[in-house]
Amino acid sequence: MTTPSERIVVAQLASGILDYAEAATNGTVARLPYPGNLQLALDRLTMLAWRQEVDPPSGVVGLLQLASTPFGDWDIQLPEADVDPDESLLAHGRPTATCEEFGTLRGDVEGEMRENALLRSVMDKTRAAGAPDSYVAFRRLLIERPAITALELDMKLADPALAIVADELRQAYPEVPPEAKADGIVRTCAGCHGVRLPLDDDRTWTCQDESCPAPGTSGPDHPAAEGVHWLRRELRTFITGPGRAELRIAEAVASMGVPALLWPDFDSCDVSVFADRPWAADVKAWRNPVRLGRSLRKKLFTVPPGTDRAFIVIAREQVRAHPRYIALLRRACPDLKPGNRVVAISEKQFLDYVRKRAEEQS
Ligand SMILES: [Zn+2]
């Protein structure tokens, strides 16, 4: 028997955890056996452990404990898995951004399908209505308001720009989970405007967003009885996280007096800069450059017709956390090196390029 790819094992474990978390949210855990991916990951990790002559995880419970442990502390070695030693798949019993990134690497991604189905439905409806402003309003709401009170959500649903995607908005914003309102109060984060959840001690409340610009700051508290909704986790990871950088970049470009469009033509790219011979930017906020590179190798973004230059732009937070991010990304996906149709650069470098071209033109 051949040794299973370490990357596939970790992706399977991540998928199993996401399925498990999804079932737990829906309250269906007690009626279901463990997700198939968890069992498969357990079998395969057990095989790896035997080969490396270390102890395998003791059942699914041991597997979940292992998932909460940083990879650097595992007895089982995973040099081929594209993980950083300080990363884990679970933190305080909840899936991490690392877990979400691995989840998207599996072949048949339920979470990704769901996300795509929802976003595709928004795109189809706004396109059919000839309402690009509605599409932009939807994206902007998800970024600016990951948590929203029932009253505010009702007001948004009544907003003419958002009314045509009311069904999708309701799907995107389920009620906060029970642990968020244990003592009758839902706490928010001033940094990302999301929900803060209690740690195991039930006294410390933390922001769940790993790229939150100010995770320690408390935002307004809301009485749970009035109803509070929280954006689905995969939308927080893949829309809200990079979205903050998208809004920031568009604002920085506009402040140079250069026109910037967010998600033009129903998301042909994230930010389009310059009216004439435009530049297209696809903004990425993945935690790990090698995993992003692998994902881009499978599917690089389609450059909109008429584009002068196209960039994968890595958000400031990620470059700061991983100093060699761009080099590692270009190595994992050589199609992104300078000279290609699409080039990977940092947010700062992108803004420098824009400034230079704006100065040359004036
Ligand atoms: Zn936050």
Image: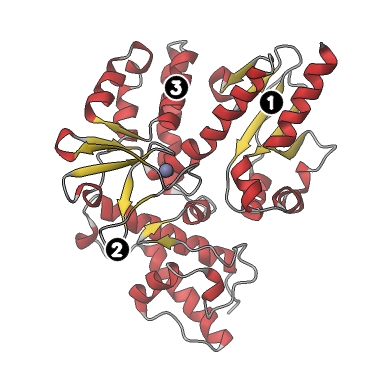
Given the current orientation, which residue lies at the most extreme left position?
Answer: 225
Dot 1 amino acid type: Ala
Q: Is mark 1 within 8 Å of ligand 1?
A: no
Given the current orientation, which residue lies at the most extreme bottom position?
Answer: 53
Q: Which mark is residue 280?
A: 1
**Is 78 in front, or is 323?**
323
**Is 109 in front, or is 147?**
147
- For numbered disc 3, what is the local secondary structure? helix
Dot 3 amino acid type: Asp
Q: Quadrant of the N terminus?
A: bottom right
Q: Earlier in the sequence, mark 2 or mark 1?
A: 2
- For numbered disc 1, what is the local secondary structure? strand
Q: Which mark is residue 98?
A: none
Q: Where is mark 3, residue-wise?
A: 124
Q: Is residue 213 left or right of residue 225?
A: right
Q: Where is mark 2, residue-wise?
A: 200
Q: Quadrant of the C terminus?
A: top right
CA separation in Å, label 1 and label 3: 22 Å
Image position, residue 153 (x, y; %): 28, 26
Dot 2 amino acid type: Asp
